Image (spheres, rainbow, N blue to C red):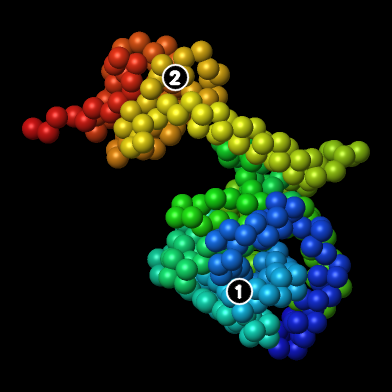
Amino acid sequence: MPRAPKINWPRAAVALAASIPKERLHAEAVKWTGGGSDAARASWAVAFSGGADSLALLLLLWAHWPERRARLVAVHFDHRLRGRASAADAKFCEQVCAALGVKFVGGAWAGARKGASEAEARAARFEFFQRESGRRRIRALWLGHQQDDIAETLLMRLARGSGTGGLSAPRPVQAMPGGRVHVRPLLTLKKHELITALTAAGATWREDASNETEDYFRNRIRHEGLPAWAASATDRDALAGAALSRELLEEDDNALEAWLAELAPLSADGARLDVRALQGKPRALVRRALHRWLLAQADTGDLSRQGFATLLAAVEKGSFTRFSLGRSGFAVIRKGLLIFEPVPIG
């Protein structure tokens, strides 16, 4: 694979932007950039692994938004799970950024260990992104998810019984805590489209060998489940269909959020849930309100799915209930309010 300095990266970026004009990017992501919000005017960070998706994202941002180049930051996280290959990824990313005049910020996983789960690696990566965003006052993190990722995520989350919130991921514009936002403009494009366009532009990228193994659930979905599923839809574009379903699920999820906000059953501090405001409402709305209440409590233990279902039924009924939440205390419905009663100390 050619080293980065042998490639004219500004020229490759311009060529890529010509084959993938701004109009082909997700409309919500593009709209966000012109929203005039503080986040849109602030510095942007790109999660840059060196793979095809994140490379395409960096090049397209550089080419389509030239006015942002001076405040564009590429953040790279070395998981330290692939030895020299991981170090080579970081070096490649640094070289690309140097050629484009983009600030490069690298980090490494201090807690890396053999056999670490996909979830642990992802958590460490996003902890690094969040820390650097706070340190550098970055409000927007751009991510290279594309249509294949939508289908993979959909199949993975169906396996664990996710609702509209989980099934509508990944979103083109996702509000995050602290006023930050994640932006994903490539959700309208398929992986093979990005590969074809990058190759035509004369670009090369890094391949993560761990993506080819079957160690992780996502990899098994990617290499076995997704191809078989897409191939079985002989007269349909399964990836585009998954992307459309994601859009519709996001609309439904937003509608439920808006309805719940109008009802406002949760107190400002999250301590009390007015179950009377939820009487006669669809279970989807009651479920969402109960989730919000549980998240607002300091310690509700490890509530099982069956336990949640039992508490949900009690909230729907609205009569007096005292439900154990483990050693920490009880969920109590009294006088139309759901509150948390801690176990008395001593």
- Residue 300 drawn above or below residue 93: above
Dot 1 falls on a residue whose secondary structure is: strand
Considering every residue shown, the one lying at the far left of the view is 346
Based on the displayed image, in which of its 4 quarters is residue 158 positioned?
top right
Return the x and y of residue 79 as percentages of the image width and height: 51, 68
Return the x and y of residue 157 as percentages of the image width and height: 60, 39
Kindly identify which residue carries mark 2: 277
Tell me the CA gap for discs 1 and 2. 46 Å
Q: Amino acid at mark 1?
A: Leu
Based on the displayed image, in which of its 4 quarters is residue 299 positioned?
top left
Q: Amino acid at mark 2?
A: Ala
Q: Quadrant of the C terminus?
A: top left
Q: Residue 186 vs residue 105: left or right? A: right
Name the residue: 65% across, 39% down: 250
Asked if the residue at tag 2 contacts the one at tag 1, i.e. Cβ–Cβ closer than 8 Å, the answer is: no
Q: Quadrant of the N terminus?
A: bottom right
Based on the displayed image, in which of its 4 quarters is residue 191 positioned?
bottom right
Dot 2 falls on a residue whose secondary structure is: helix
Name the residue: 57% across, 80% down: 103
Please give the label number shown on residue 72: 1
- Residue 21 drawn above or below residue 26: below
Q: For marks 1 and 2, give the one nearer the viewer.
A: 2
Residue 220 visible in the shown view: no
Return the x and y of residue 11 as percentages of the image width and height: 80, 82
Residue 178 visible in the shown view: yes
Return the x and y of residue 184 as percentages of the image width and height: 66, 56
Q: Residue 188 vs residue 114: left or right? A: right
**Nearest the eye: 212 or 185:** 185
Crowd around label 1: few <14 · some 14–19 · many ≥20 (10 Å):
many
Considering every residue shown, the one lying at the far right of the view is 235
